[in-house]
Image (cartoon, rainbow, N blue to C red):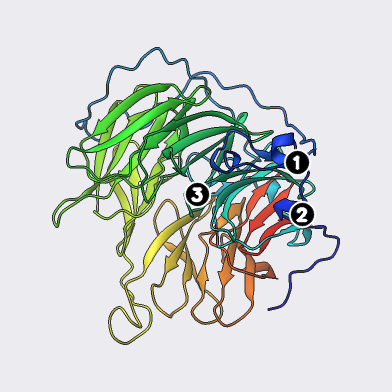
Amino acid sequence: MPSTPDSGRTDTNTDTENRQPTSESEASPTESEATSTEQAETTESALSRRRLLAAAGGSLLVGGTGGYLVGARPFAPPDCDALPVAVEDDEWSFPNHDRRHTATAPASTAPESLTEEWRVSWGVSNHGPPAVANDVAFVAAVEGNDRESLFAFDLRTGERAWRVPFPGDREARPVVAAGESVYYHTNIEDRGRTALALGMVDGRERWSDSIGDLHGYAPPLGLADGKVLLDDPTVREDGQTVVALDSETGEQCWQTQLDVDSLTPFPAVKGDTAYYVSRGGGEDASGSLVALNAATGAVTWETTIPKMADGPPVLGDDFAYVTIFDGPLVAVSLESGEEVWRHEQDTLFGSGDPGHQYAQPSYELGALTSSALVARLEAYTTASDRIRAFDPETGDVLWTRVAGGTDTWVTPPTAAGEAVFVAENREHDSNRLLRLDARTGTVRDSTAFEGWTHHGPVCTEAGALFVTGNGVVFYS
């Protein structure tokens, strides 16, 4: 494969043997160090700090007058003085940029070109989506020793700031970086499924909350109204549990038992309302979109959607967008809870025996810009994926792009303004990172990349960060 342009770049290796120890115990690792996240591996570099905005007063409850009330069993919340956590729009604090999952940063953050500024080389078997805050990039990855770790890199230089290992798991999960903390949820040996808040500067553990048993999937954490929202992925007959923790202390603020079937992980948040999607269960059971008051855990309304919802909702100004596995893309009014439009995907990709050469594709939501809702259409076959853009108000198809090459799978789109970024993982050709026009699908820029990736680049005021299995790349 052609190499990525290396003009003007610096190359840093993540080999932990080359880092400078920060303490005597780190210079001579012990068995206890290998099983604890209390001491993060750090370097001596000083990290630049950006001034955080003050938390805005007041909040807006969306959808409180629409839909209908549903059964929920919240316990009476204690005196939980959680303060809202301020984030800056020109950072990428959440896996999908913001709490609403729009995956779209301001237009001013789009890089002028896909010119490589620096690169950190590594070889990992898995990586999660990155987050960026305070000029630091955070990303989880599974290294060659099958150990999950959370890394922090200086966004300006690529120098590694710290690394925290998590013994007991081989997954790499989404990160949330906001305020003074990095929030992460994973399985830790001898501690079970654990939610953590780590110091953004040094990676030291500020608080943790463990349930004591492991689970194959630890859902990403939500952040709303100064609270970390944590849902239990275990499917139970008596409903699903959502817990809110104070983002500063880890103190439990409330717990709600929802009378719904299994939840898709990671709520979308608008104002002080968190929106969860229930997949629905049984042949005739529908799914639902559920709104919770983040301050109390009370359910304010629920509306019916088709069953088998796939992934969290994306929230616009007036609509929530939801995808259905092997089914339609649906827009729901946040005011009334009524369905506004739906797009049915009824064209099979490929030809031949079902399940071998063709299959019903499914949508995965990506970027919501001012002019387009851009989604990935996953093929589940040897045919290549598609990228499709919709008018957010009407659901009309604006354009469709078939990924280049054969058997090509693409990342969910990310964006900065009307610039959309998609990575094409090509089975038999050079992988490409594309910059598209959200309004037309026209390719405005492209560059080759080595390795593979599950996530598109994230854009900040300094440039665009792109993570692959071969390394971390920064474009200015």
Residue type, mark 2 in image: Ser
Residue shown at the point (68%, 60%) measured from the top left: 122
Q: Which residue is mark 2?
A: 476
Q: Earlier in the sequence, mark 1 or mark 3?
A: 1
Tally of numbered discs = 3
Task: Decide which of 257, 283 is in the foreground and name it.
Answer: 257
Place of residue 466 in the rendered image (x, y in percent of width and height, measured from the top left): 65, 57
Q: What is the CA distance from the residue labelled 1 to the residue labelled 3?
A: 26 Å
Q: Earlier in the sequence, mark 2 or mark 3?
A: 3
Residue type, mark 3 in image: Arg
Assign the C terminus to one quadrant of the image: bottom right
Q: Which residue is mark 3?
A: 173
Q: Is residue 125 left or right of residue 63?
A: right
Q: Secondary structure at mark 1?
A: loop
Q: Is residue 66 visible?
A: no
Q: Is residue 273 left or right of residue 67?
A: right
Q: Which residue is mark 1?
A: 21
Residue type, mark 1 in image: Pro
**Mark 3 crowd level (few <14, some 14–19, many ≥20, 10 Å Cα):** many
User: Is label 1 or label 3 in front?
Assistant: 1
